[in-house]
Image: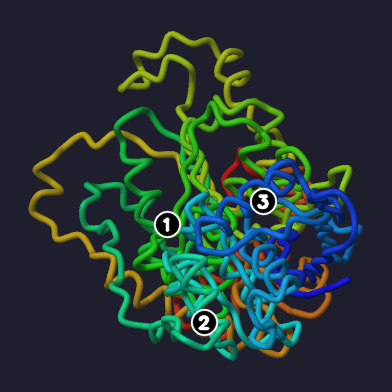
Amino acid sequence: MPIARAWSMALFGVRGIPVEIEADIGVGLPGTTLVGLPDTGLREAKDRVRSAVRNSGCEWPARKVTFGLSPANLPKVGSAYDLGIALAVLAAAGTIPSGKLVGTVLLGELALDGRIRPVRGVLPSVLGARDNGLRRAVVPLDTLTEAGLVDGVEVLGAGSLAEVLAWCRGTVTLRSAPEPGGQAEPEVADLADVTGQPEARWALEVAAAGGHHLLLIGPPGVGKTMLARRLPGLLPPLSTDEALEVTAVHSVDGSLAPDAPLVRTPPFIAPHHSISAAALVGGGAQLAAPGAVSKAHRGVLFLDESCEFGANRLESLRTALEEGEVRLARVRGVVEYPARFQLVLATNPCPCAPRREADCICSAATRRRYLGKLSGPLLDRVDITVPMRPVTAMHAHLAEQPETTATVRERVVAARDRARHRWAEHGWVTNADVPGPWLRTTITADTDATALLDHGLQRGFLSVRGADKCLRLAWTLADLAGRSAPGMDEVAAAMELRDRTAA
């Protein structure tokens, strides 16, 4: 009974797990069986692969063929196993030598004519292969650049099953992955385009410097969306490890550009308020897919008209904001996706949203009810709240030269460098990452400064979490000012940025 083996990869969140594909050609009536928890798409692989093999000039064994996918208790989802299944059965039949299949990961969906189609999750799959000691990968040509981002693995691209069969026989050489690099940086919106709003611009700079969450409140047309879209341009470029993290999530989601797959700049994700909770935090049948919060990892999640999102969707953000990841439990397992993002909320002050406050027809109860859709626990996780008002005099702003994104980013990068050096031994990158208990017990701030926090706690303006947020903001303000530690001025300014409604 001939048996041959090949390797493919299963994705569990953004973690790649090697799957051994065993093909056994036994005695019995002709037929094909797949075992090892395949999903519906994978169970259909036997028909796709059989046609692809025949149309690539080979014969499918006219005997009983059994495929075993190990580990058997791991759910197998998708069509990326097609190429591995085809080579395993042809190696078992003696059609091709099996030497090159040892230590080689095979990824790709087969068309009926033998073409190899691209699949999702190639980058995390190749990363998982490298981490598990597999040193070669054959991937679809359309994903060759993406797979080539991984060091330590020989990455080869193929356009058809016939090409891979010829490579196994040693008659052709598959295309190698290009050297990473040379990808053009995407253009970002410039902060100089925003007219007026000096307080909001300053708050945006503070949020970028410390990694703080932000709430913008104001009538339509004052520039809330414009400001939010300019936040990614103020953030430092992603490091190599961070870029791979973000790219892996977008690879699983299938939203990478084939010619420029590496995500080098912080992503900006702005879902519509009609989005479902599953699409926001992740979900789906069987093993859950990443949601908007994971696609915004290391970047910005912008919720415009946030009061229209609905309580269940907004409250689902709370755990992700605190822990920086999302854990989605399904019958077949628990999937973890990273979700460390900066949240920017924007909302009108009331349902009628007039241009002038004097024109508002909403009662005080209606305004409270509208803003009450943003619950206290959610607002307690927002560091900065900025009321915005309409610009009333264009000529006053036409003469001034507002600062550009590049100018502000220099200050932001300098402040982040100070924070990173200060927290380096603890592994924290920004002030927003520092745990509250460590801030309260280890950092000794100015006595007058801490007295301000004590007053806010006693009067009920601040919760303990809110006091921690003020301390983190104070450290960010000190970093922007080039001071070694925050004083009373920084703590007072931090309490003002927190605002009455966010305390």
Asked which secondary structure carries label 3, the reply is loop
**Kind of residue indicated by mark 2:** Trp
Left or right of residue 203, residue 36 in this image = right
Looking at marks 1 and 3 on the same chain, the residue that comes earlier in the sequence is marked by 3
**Is residue 169 among the parts visible in the rendering?**
yes
Quadrant including the C terminus? top right
Q: Residue at x 73, y 41 (%)?
A: 40
Residue holding disc 3: 78
**Kind of residue indicated by mark 1:** Leu
Left or right of residue 2, residue 159 in this image = left
The x, y position of residue 487, in whole percent, is 59, 74
Residue holding disc 2: 167
The x, y position of residue 264, in whole percent, is 42, 71
Front-lying residue, 97 or 128: 97
Looking at marks 1 and 2 on the same chain, the residue that comes earlier in the sequence is marked by 2
Left or right of residue 102, residue 54 in this image = left
Q: Residue at x 64, y 50 (%)?
A: 290
